[in-house]
Image (cartoon, rainbow, N blue to C red):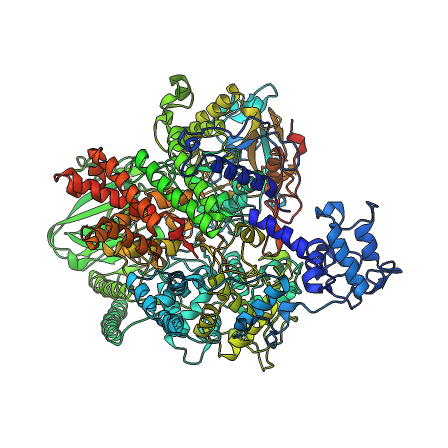
Amino acid sequence: MMINPFQQFCDVQNRRQFIKNASIGLGAAVVSSMTGPLSAAPPRGLHHAPKAKRVIFLFMAGAPSQLDLFDYKPDLEKLHGQPLPKEISRGQRVTTMTRGKEQVICASIFKFYRKGKNGIYWSELLPHISSMADDICLIKSTHTEAINHDPAKTFFCTGAEIPGKASMGAWLSYGLGTMNRDLPEFIVLTSAFWSGKVNVQALYSRLWGSGFLPSQHQGVAFQSVGDPVPFLSNPAGVNRKARHQMLDFVAKINQEQQVLTGDPEIQTSIAQQEMAFRMQMSVPELTDLSTEPQAIMDMYGPEVHKTGSFARNCLLARRMAERDVRFIQLFHRGWDHHTALPKHLRGQARDVDQPIAALLKDLKQRGLLNETLVVFAGEFGRTTYAQGSRDRENYGRDHHPRCFTTWMAGGGIKGGISYGETDDFCYNIAKDPVHIRDFHATMLHQLGIDHNRLAFPYQGLDQRLTGVEESRVIKEILS
Amino acid sequence: MIRLILFIALLASAGVAGGERIEFHRDIRPILADRCFRCHGPNEKDRKSHLRLDQAEGEEGAYRTHKGTTALKPRNLEDSELWYRITTENQDDAMPPAESHKKALSGAEKQRFKQWILEGAQYQDFWAFIPPQPSPPPQVKDASWREGIIDPRVMAHLEKKGLTPKGEADKRTLIRRLTFDLTGLPPSLKEIEAFLEDSSAGATVALVDRLLGKQSYGEHMARYWADLVRFADTNGMHKDFPRDFSTYRSWLIRAFNDNLRFDEFVKYQVAGDLYPEASRDQMIASGFNRLHLIIDRGTALPEESHHKNVLDRVAAFGTTFLGLTLQCAQCHDHKYDPISQKEYYQLYAFFNNFDGEPETGKVDKGWRQAPFIMLTTPEQDETLAALRADEDAASAEVKKMRAAEKQAQTWPKLEKASVPWIWNDKDLNSKTVEFSKTLTLKQKPEWALVRYASMGEVEVTVNGKTLGRAFAWDRGLKVELSALLKPGDNQIHARAKGARGFAFELQYKVAGQEFTLASGPAWQARGDKSDKGEPWQPALEVHNAKHKEGWSERTKSPKIMDLEAQLAQAKKSRDNLLAKIPAAMVMRDRAKPKRTHVLIRGAYDAPGEQVQRNTPAFLPALKKKEGFYTRMDLAEWLVAEDHPLTARVAVNRFWQQFFGVGLVKTSEDFGAQGEWPSHPELLDALSFGFMESGWNVKKLVRTIVLSKTYRQISDGTPEEFLRDPENRDLARGSRYRMDAEMIRDQILFLSGRLNTTMYGKSVKPPQPPGLWKAVSMAAPLTYVPDTGDKIYRRSFYTYWRRGMPPPQMTIMNAPSREFCLARRERTNTPLQALLLMNEPEFFKAAKACAENTLKEAQGDPSRGLSLLYEKVTSHRPDQERLRLLEDTLEGFRELYRNDRALTESLVPELKKADLEPGANLAAWTMVTHGLFNLELAKVKR
C-alpha cells in the first residue's frame, strides 16, 4: 500500500549525508548546477520493469471531433441529413444543448487517406502527425461517463468527476519518485492562444493537483508570461551572488537551530532552499531555446517563435524529456466545436499537427521515443449528429462520451495500429472498449506500475487512479 | 514520508507487547477493516459466503456456523476457520485472496489474532459510536501533572510508555506560541516585554485571556472553519463564476469572537433558516448549505446538477459534523461503516428540498445567487422602499396605459407578408450594417404601425428617436409610431449587428388611404469596414434567409416605451444600490418536500425505492414526532447529549489546531477506516466536558492552551524526533511549519503595513501575471489586483478562486476549497522556498521592516540587528548570533557598495544620493529578508 517509502527515505538520507559532507552552509556542489538525471542507472519500475520512463500527455481540452480527425466513416456520406436510427441512439443521455432536438446524421467533410505501412486511415487535417503513423496506436474505442467539460476533464486527469482526487502526474511522482535533482517531476504547459476561438473551456488547477496525495507531487504549471515557475526570479536588487550570500546566512542559522532543537525537518528545509537555488539556474536554462539549431526550430513550425504557443510548448516538452521530467502535460484549448466545426477544427489541427509530429520525430531521432510515452486525448468525443446547422461548412457537433479516439506512441506501445472499433455511425462501441480507467491502467503499466497496487489510504478507502471499478491494461497494444 | 514509515514501524513494534490484553478496536478491527470488510463487511451486496466479520452475532456474524464451518470459535484456534484461512499455505484457501490485491497478514498480525481468539474473540461496539464517557482522572506519579482534564491523562500515557514530559517553554517561546495559536499573528515587542515583566503566577492565564479577547482571535479560528466548509469566492465549476459569500465569513468571525455556543453554531449552519423568526445571523449561517460547487446553466442537465449539489451538501454535513465519509454509501452500502445505501438517501432527503435553481443562471450585480437576504441598515431600508414605491407607481402607470391602448386599439392586424431581408451584401459578410430610408408624408398619419426584426440585433430610430431594439422574428418589435411622424421628410435609420439580415415593414394610413413601406432595394445600406463607415449603397436582398414567419405581436408605443425606459432606469439605480449592500446567500426549503428515492448505483436518473428522512440506525434515533422530520430536527439530533460524534469530532479538530495532529489523526474520518485515538480517555473527557460547559469553545481552547501538556518545550533530541515525529505521545511541545496565512500575515505585520480592517468583501493582493488567463473561460478573465492598503489585509480576506486559488497560499498547502478539508497537510518543497525567497510583496515587506528598524536603531547597528532579530523571532540573539548578523550585514554592505546598479535597483528612491546609504539599506533589507526565510520565522515551536 505504501509506495517505495524506503527508497524515498534512502534518498533523503543520502542527501542529508551529502550535505553534511559538504560542510555547513550552501555546499560547493549546490553552486555548480547539476542539470540532468540523477544517475545513468536503468530505470526501476515500482512493480515490474517499465517500458517508459516518462510521459508527455497532450491534452486537447474541449474535445476534438474523432469523426473529423481519426474515425473514418465513409458510409455516413450517404446518410448525411437523415435521422440517426433510434436503435442506435437508444434514448441515451445527451446534453441540454441538444436535448429534445432531432438527431440528424452529419458526415465529415474532410477527406481521409491511408497512412503508414498498415494503411491506417487518417484525416487530411493531420498530414504531419499521420506521417508518423507507424509509431502511433490509435484507440478508437475510448469512452467515459461524463458528458460535460468540467467533470469530464476532471475525470480524465484525476480518475473521478468530483474534485479532490490526485492527478495522473501526481500519482506518478508519488509512485516513482524523482529522476531529477533540478526540476519538478510534473510540469504543466498551457497554450496561451489557439485558433478555435469559440466556446473556450476553462481549466482548473485541480487537473494537475495532488488531491489527497502530499502536495509536493502536484504539477507545476509553467507560465508563458513572467517567470515560468511562480516566484522563480530574484526580486529587483538581488542577484545570484546576493542570493547565495543570503541563503548561506539562512543555512548557517538553520543548521545551528537544528543542533539546538533537534528538529530534523530543518534539514529538509535547507535541502529545499538548495533545490530552489538550483532551479533558478536550471529552469531558465530549460526554457532558453537559443541553443536549439535552426533546423530543429523549423521542424516545429513558425509558431515555435511565439511564447506560449503549442509549438513552443512541444519543443519545451522535448527539452524536459531530455532532462528527465517524469510527467509533462500540455493543455491546448479551443476544441469545443458546437458550431462552425470545419472552420475551427482546421485552425486547431494546424495549431497542433506540425508541432506534435516534430515532437515525435525529435524524440525519435534522440532515441527518447522508445522510453517516452506520448499520449494524445481530449475529455470526450463529439456526436455523429449535427448541432445547429448541418451545412457542409458550418456544422457543429455536441459532446459525446460513448466513443472517441485517443492515441499513444512510443514508450513500448505498438505503432501503426488501430485498436477498438465503433459502430457504423460512430455512436456506440462495436469492439474492444477502452474506458479511461483502462487507459490509465495502461499508462501506469508502461511505467512499471500495477494500477491495482498504486494506492493511497484516504477517507477510509485505498484510493487509486483507476478507482474502485475494474480496469485492465490494454495488453493488445503493447509491443 | 519518513515520518510515516517510522510511525508504522513504531505501531507495529508497539502492538501488544508485554502480555497486554488484546483490544478489539485497537488491535483487530483495523486489520479486519483493511483486509476483510470488502467482502465480509457491512455491505450486503458484496458479501461473500454469508459471512460478516464486523459483528460477532447474527445469522451471518462471525460466530455463525455455515455449512459446518464456524468463522470464529472463541478460545478455539482449531475450530476457527478464520485462523486457518489467514495462516494456510494453500493458495486456494488463503485469505485475503490474491485477486483482492490485499497484503497477507504479517507474522505480528497473525499473533494478534491468535491471542485474541484465545482470549475469547470478543467484539466491542465501535468506540466512536458510543457516547463519550467521563472517566475519573488516572493516578499519576508526578504530582504536578494531576490537575485538570488534560495533564493527568497525558501523563498516564507517558508513564505507561516510560516517557517523561518536557518542562515548560521559556516565556518568549510561550508568548510567541500562544499569540500565533490564538490570533494567527506574532506578538509585538511591547507585548513580549509586558509578559516578561509580569512575574505573577497568573501571568500566562492573563495573557491567554487577553488573547482570547482580541478580534484577531475570531479571524484566526474562522479560517480553519473556512477550509472545513470549503468557503470560497467562486462557484468552482465550468466557468467558475464569482459569488459573494463574504457575509458568511463575517458571521464566522463574529461567532467565534462572541463565543457563540458551539451547539448553536452547528444548528445555525445546518438549519438556521428554519428557526421561527430566524435572525439575520441564523439566516447567514444557513448559507453553509450553499457552499457547494455549482455549475453554471448551459450544458449540464439540471436534474443531474441538482443531484450533484445534494451529494456535495451531504458530504459536507458528514465531514464537518460527523467526521464520517457518508459519501461512500451513495452507490452501495458503506464498505466499512454501518451505513446502508438506503440510510444514505434518508440523510440525503434532508438536503434534497432546496428552493432554488440547481445551476447558476441569473445572479444579481453583487454576484449573489437566489435565495439571498439583503443585510440592509434601517436607512437603506427606507431608501429602498422609496425607490420601490416610485417603481411601482411607474409600473402601474404603464399597465394603465397598456390597458387603455388596447381598448382604443383599432390597428389592423399585420399580414404574414413576406418582407424581404436586406443587407449590404448578399453573403452577409459585414458584421454591422446601417440602413437608411426617407419617408415623405403629406400630412401626419392617422395611425402608423411598424414591425421589424433581425436575426442578430437591430435598433431603429425615426427622426432621431429610438423605437427600441429587436432581435429574431419571434423577438421582433411592433411599434405604433404615428406620434413620431411628421409631414415632410421622415428619416428612418437602422443599425443591425450580427451579420444576419434585417427586415422592416411599416403600414400607415393617410387621408383614408393605407400605405406600406417595406425593407428592400430602395433602402440605402453601408457596412462597417472603415471607422467612418463605407459609402451608402443600395441595400441588397438576402435570399437564403429563413424563418420569416411568426412575427412577434409585442406592440410598443413610444409613450409606453418612454415610461418603460424610466422604469428600467429606476430599477437600475435600485439594483446598483442593492449591489453595494451586503447580502447573504441562504438556505430555503420548498414548502412541499421533494420526494427522495434510493438512486441505484448513485445515478441521478435511476430512482429505486422511495425513502423518508431519517438518520442511520447505528447512531441515536431522532426524537419521535408527527409528520416529517426537518433539517432542524437533524440539527438538534446532532447536538443532543447522547450523540457520540459531534462533540468528539469538534474537540478533536480544535485539538489539532493547537498540536498539529488530532488525538484522532484522521480528523475527517471517525469511522472504521479512521485511526484509533492516541488518547481515547482524553478525547472522551474533553468532549464530555465540552458539552457540559455548554459547548463553550473559548473555555475549551483555554483549557487546552493552559495545560502543561501544551506548554512544554518543543525541542528534543534527534532520537526523540525519530521515535515520535508527529508528537503523538505528547512528550514535548508540538512544532511544525505554520500555515500559509500565518506566514504571510506575519510578514505583513513585521513590515508595519498589516491592515487590520475586519469583515467585508474579499481583496486581491498582487499575484504573478497570467495565472487566471491561462485557465479562464469567461469574464473575469484576468486577475486585477487591488491597490492601496487593501493588499495588506490579513490573508483570510484574500480572494479565493476555486479553479485557480492564490499561489501564495496553495504553494504552502492551503486547499483549493473545492471540497471539505478537515486538516491541511504540511510539506516542504522547493516552490515554498522560492515563494519566501522571491515573492515581490514579501521582499518589499522586508525592506519596509528594515527601514523601520534602522530608524529605531538610532545609529547603533548592533542594537538595530538585535531589535530586528527579536521582531522576527521573538527572541534576542546571543553574542555569537549577533556577531553572525553583524558579519552578514557587513558582507551585504560590501556586496552592494561594489555594485551601484544592483543597489539602485533595490533602492531606486536613493538613486541620486551617495551610494553608501543605499548600500546600507540594501544590506539591512537582505539581512531582514534572510531572517524572514528562517525556520525560526516560519515554524511554530
Tell me: residue B284, above or below residue A192: below
Which residue ends up furthest to the front in the rendered image?
Answer: B879
Q: Quadrant of residue A340?
A: top left
For residue B41, which quarter of the picture? bottom right
Residue B611 position (above or below residue B931)? below
| Front one among B698 and B331 | B698
Q: Is residue A423 visible?
A: no
Which residue is at the front of the view, B207 or A151? B207
Q: What x and y, as percent, mark residue A345? A: 44, 33
Residue at image point 29% right, 53% down: B866
**Residue at far left of view:** B488
Q: From this viewpoint, is residue A167 visible?
A: yes
B537 vs B288, left or right, is left
For residue B284, above or below residue A254 = below
How many discs mark residues in the rendered view?
A: 0
Position of residue B135 in the picture relative to residue B260 (left or right): right
Q: Position of residue B211 (x, y in %)?
A: 36, 69
Q: Give B95 or A89, whichever is nearer the viewer.
A: B95
**Does residue B698 appear left or right of residue A473 in this picture?**
left
Quarter of the image with the C terminus of chain A in it = top right
Q: Residue furthest right?
A: B68
Picture coordinates of residue B142, whole percent (x, y): 56, 70
Give the residue at x 34% y 52%.
B878
Question: Toward the viewer: B612 or A101?
Answer: B612
